[in-house]
Amino acid sequence: MAQVFAEISMSLDGYIAGPDDGVDNPLGDHGERLHEWVYGLASWRAPHGLTGGEQNRDAEVVHESVERTGSVVMGRRMFDSGEGPWGDEPPFHAPVFVVTHRPAEDLLKQGGTTFHFVTEGVEEALRRAKEVAGGKDVSVPGGAQVIDQLLGAGLLDALQIHLVPVLLGGGVRLFDTLPAGLRELKATRVIASPEVTHLRLHTA
């Protein structure tokens, strides 16, 4: 059965984007710093149509995620911010289900990515994503509200946080919209490198 895993880079003070984020400033002020660790890795560059790159433990972590992903669920805000930079051949190479209040026709891109816009809520998007995952897992790269909704509803199996040693001091936090109540997560793997610490957490 397909697992549902969220994966996101986060600052030490809990932000996944800096202040003043928007379509013209997708990661917010200084938010790009959260992702600098990944740009030079071969396993990140390949899905983006780029050659070369580093082969190290960070690259192996990214490669694992790429290989296990059969479909994707994301929020509309993430789609709106990323559509321009992703270009005609987005890096997903899989069906992507966008949770939104605005109906839209399916958007077919090069390289195997098709964006499906789901207005019936995150649970329906997840149901459809599982149907087409092809025996692989469902990846949830963001945004924060979609991750919080899935975690709050008990629909997230695992969470991988790439913890970057930087303090943004403001912006968009993960877990801010999570319903109140205690949740126990189990750390099943911790990998540290000079640029980032990878935390793999399971919900059960």
Image (spheres, rainbow, N blue to C red):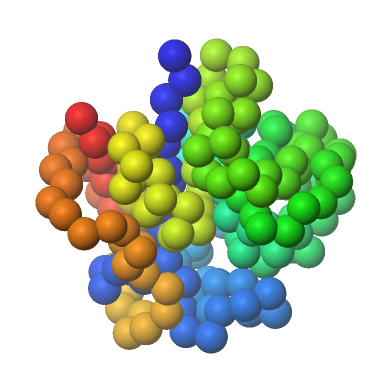
Residue toward you, 183 or 113: 183
Residue toward you, 55 or 157: 157
Question: Dividing the picture into quarters, in which one does residue 40 lie?
Answer: bottom right
Query: From the image, which quarter does the C terminus lie in?
Result: top left
Is residue 73 found left or right of 61 in the rendered image? right
The residue located at (56%, 46%) in the rendering is 121
Judge whether 179 appears above or below 54 on screen.
Answer: below
- Residue that lies at the very extreme toward the front in this rendered image: 120
Is residue 134 found left or right of 8 in the rendered image? right
Residue toward you, 183 or 35: 183
Query: From the image, which quarter does the N terminus lie in?
Result: top left
Residue 17 location in percent, x, y? 47, 72
Residue 69 location in percent, x, y? 55, 29
Question: Dividing the picture into quarters, in which one does residue 11 lie?
Answer: bottom left
Residue 80 location in percent, x, y? 70, 64
**Number of numbered callouts drawn:** 0
Residue 183 in sight: yes
Residue 127 location in percent, x, y? 55, 29
The residue located at (66%, 48%) in the rendering is 119
The residue located at (62%, 29%) in the rendering is 128
Judge whether 170 appears above or below 115 on screen.
Answer: below
Residue 68 in sight: no
The residue located at (16%, 47%) in the rendering is 183
Is residue 96 found left or right of 6 in the rendered image? right
